[in-house]
Image (tube, rainbow, N blue to C red):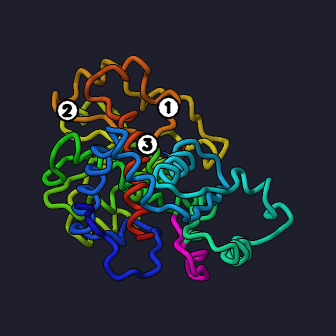
Amino acid sequence: MVISLNKDKKVRHIIKSQQFEVGFLQSLFHRVAQIKKQFENGAGRVILRQRLSNKLLINLFYEASTRTRLSFAAAAYHLGMNVMGTENAREFSSAIKGETLEDSIKVLCHYCPDAIVIRHHEEGSVAKAAEISNVSIINAGDGKGQHPTQALLDLYTVWERLKTLNNLKILVGGDLAYGRTVRSLVYLLSKFQGTEFIFCAPEVLRMQPDIKDHLDEHSIPYVEVFENISKVIPLADVVYWTRIQKERIEANLDLDQITKEFTIDMNTMALMKPFSILMHPLPRVHEITTDVDSDIRAAYFEQAGNGMYVRMALLEWILT
Ligand code: CP
C-alpha cells in the first residue's frame, strides 16, 4: 500500500527544515524505502512512472548544481512528470535584464506548472517566491540560508545506515559559516532525542549564532572545536564533512591552508569508530582524499544516490 503523506491537499512548499515534524519524517522515510524497493524491478518502475503523469516540474537554478537539479529532474522523470527549466538563470534568464525572482515566478505560474524548484544566491529569496506563488515552491538552496531537501536525504541516509536517529553524536565539520546543508541538517537532527553536536571548523568559518541560539533554546548540547580534528573524530557516530565554500568567502583568507588542516584521509579514518559513517553533501574538492571512498564507512556517494528517491517521495507528498 502506498503511504499517503498529503492528506489535506493544500499547496505545499518546501522552504526550511524547521517545517518538518518527526512523525512526518518517519512516514517520509518509510515511503522512500518503499520507492527504493519498488525501483529494483521493471514492473515497480512502470507503476511509479504513472504516479505523477501529466504533471509539470520547472527547475529554476540561479546557482550551479549537479546533484540537486539533475536528481530532481530524474525523480520527476521516474514519476512520469515533464520537466523544463533553466540552469545558470542569472545569465540565461531575464534576470540578466533586471527581472526580479518574484516577477519571474508570477509569470511562470501562468504556465501552470505543478511545482517550481528554485536555487538562488540570496538567503530568504525562495521563501519570498513562495509567498506570491500559487504552485508548490521547493527550496533547492538559497544563498547561505538553507537546503532542506539535502538535509532530508542526509537524514534518510543516516537512518538507512545506522537504523536509528536517536542518541547520536554528530561531528559536523569544514565550512560551517557558509555551508547551508549543515544549517538545514542541524535543524532536522535537533528534533531527535539524545542528539549531541560537535562543530569542528576554522574559527573564521565557525557555526553561526542563529544555529547555536536554536540549540540553546532547545537544550541540545554542542561543543565547538577550531583545530585538531583527530581529537574529536573518535567520538562521533556520524561525521558530516563539508567543502570550504570559496565562492562565498572573502578573497584574503588562506583557503588552501585551511583546507589542508581540515582534510580527512586514511589516517583520520583509522581514528573513526568502526560502525560510524562519513558523509558529505558533495561536491568534494580536496577535503576528503579519494582513497577514503572505498572505506565501508564512506557513505557520500550512496547519500547522493538517495537524493533521487527522497525527492521522488517529496514530489509525491506535495503533488498527490
Ligand atoms: N549537494 C548539492 O547541493 O550538490 P549540487 O550543488 O551539485 O546540487
- The secondary structure type at the circle numbered 2 is helix
Residue 134 among magenta residues: yes
Q: Are marks 2 and 1 in contact (CB under 8 Å)?
A: no
Circle 3 residue:
281
Pointers 3 and 2 in contact (CB under 8 A)?
Answer: no
Q: Residue at (26%, 51%) from the top-left corner?
A: 34
Specify the segment rendered in magenta. 127-138
Mark 2 sits near ligand 1, with its Cβ under 8 Å away: no
Q: Where 118 sits versus 69, above or below?
A: below
* Vertical arrangement, residue 24 with respect to residue 186, above or below: below
Q: Position of residue 290 (x, y in %)?
A: 43, 20
Distance from Cα at disc 3 to Cα at disc 1: 16 Å
Left/right of residue 87 with respect to residue 35 in the rendered view: right
Crowd rating for badge 2 (residues with CA inside 10 Å; few <14, some 14–19, many 20+)? some
Q: Earlier in the sequence, mark 3 or mark 2?
A: 2
SS category of the residue bearing label 3: loop
203 and 143: which one is in front?
Answer: 143
Identity, as a three-letter code, of the amino acid under mark 2: Pro
Mark 3 or 2: the one toward you = 3
Residue at position x 42%, y 40% in the image = 304
Q: Is residue 255 visible?
A: yes
In the rendered image, residue 23, in percent from the top left (x then y), is placed at 21, 68
Q: Is residue 236 magenta?
A: no
- Name the amino acid type tagged 3: Pro
* Residue on which disc 1 sits: 259
Reading the image, the residue beneath label 2 is: 234
**Percent x, y for residue 107?**
73, 75
Check contact, mark 3 vs mark 1: CB within 8 A. Answer: no
Q: Mark 1 or mark 3, which is nearer the start of the sequence?
A: 1
